[in-house]
């Protein structure tokens, strides 16, 4: 038996620029799957830009 750490690289591609219907379908899919569905979160830079508007 061999013991040791296993290092794994996982790449996750997140869909961007979805239209409203696609967002609704993705949210519905998450709810049906029992996954936690979070609303879209703004990035740090988006929040920083909003400070100067």
Image: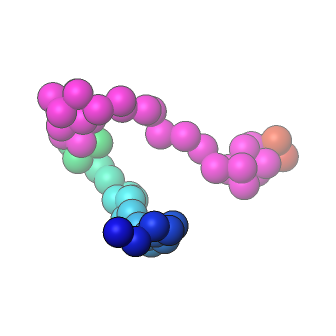
In the depicted structure, whether residue 28 falls above or below residue 7? above
* Residue 42 falls inside the magenta stretch: yes
Expressed as whole percent of the image width and height from the top left, the position of residue 2 reads: 40, 71
Which quarter of the figure has residue 27? top left
Of residues 23 and 1, the one nearer the viewer is 1
Prevailing secondary structure of the magenta residues = helix
Residue found at x 29% / y 42%: 23
Expressed as whole percent of the image width and height from the top left, the position of residue 11 reads: 40, 69
Q: Residues in magenta? A: 25-50
Expressed as whole percent of the image width and height from the top left, the position of residue 21 reads: 21, 42
Residue found at x 23% / y 28%: 34
Of residues 7 and 49, the one nearer the viewer is 7
Q: Examine the rendering and report whether any part of residue 28 can be seen.
A: no
> Residue furthest toward the front?
1
Image quadrant occupied by the C terminus: top right
> Along the horizontal axis of the image, is 38 left or right of 52?
left
Of residues 9 and 28, the one nearer the viewer is 9
Residue found at x 72% / y 54%: 45
Expressed as whole percent of the image width and height from the top left, the position of residue 15 reads: 34, 59
Q: Examine the rendering and report whether any part of residue 14 can be seen.
A: yes
> Along the horizontal axis of the image, is 37 left or right of 49?
left
> Along the horizontal axis of the image, is 9 left or right of 47?
left
In the depicted structure, whether residue 51 falls above or below residue 13? above
In the depicted structure, whether residue 22 falls above or below residue 8? above
Residue found at x 18% / y 33%: 33
Image quadrant occupied by the N terminus: bottom left
* Residue 29 falls inside the magenta stretch: yes
In the depicted structure, whether residue 14 falls above or below residue 6? above
Of residues 1 and 19, the one nearer the viewer is 1
Which quarter of the figure has residue 9? bottom left
């Amino acid at each position: 038996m061999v013991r040791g750490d296993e290092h794994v690289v996982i790449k996750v591609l997140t869909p961007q620029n979805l239209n409203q219907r696609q967002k609704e379908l993705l949210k519905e899919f998450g709810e049906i799957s029992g996954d936690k569905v979070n609303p879209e979160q703004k990035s740090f830079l988006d929040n920083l830009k909003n400070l100067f508007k």
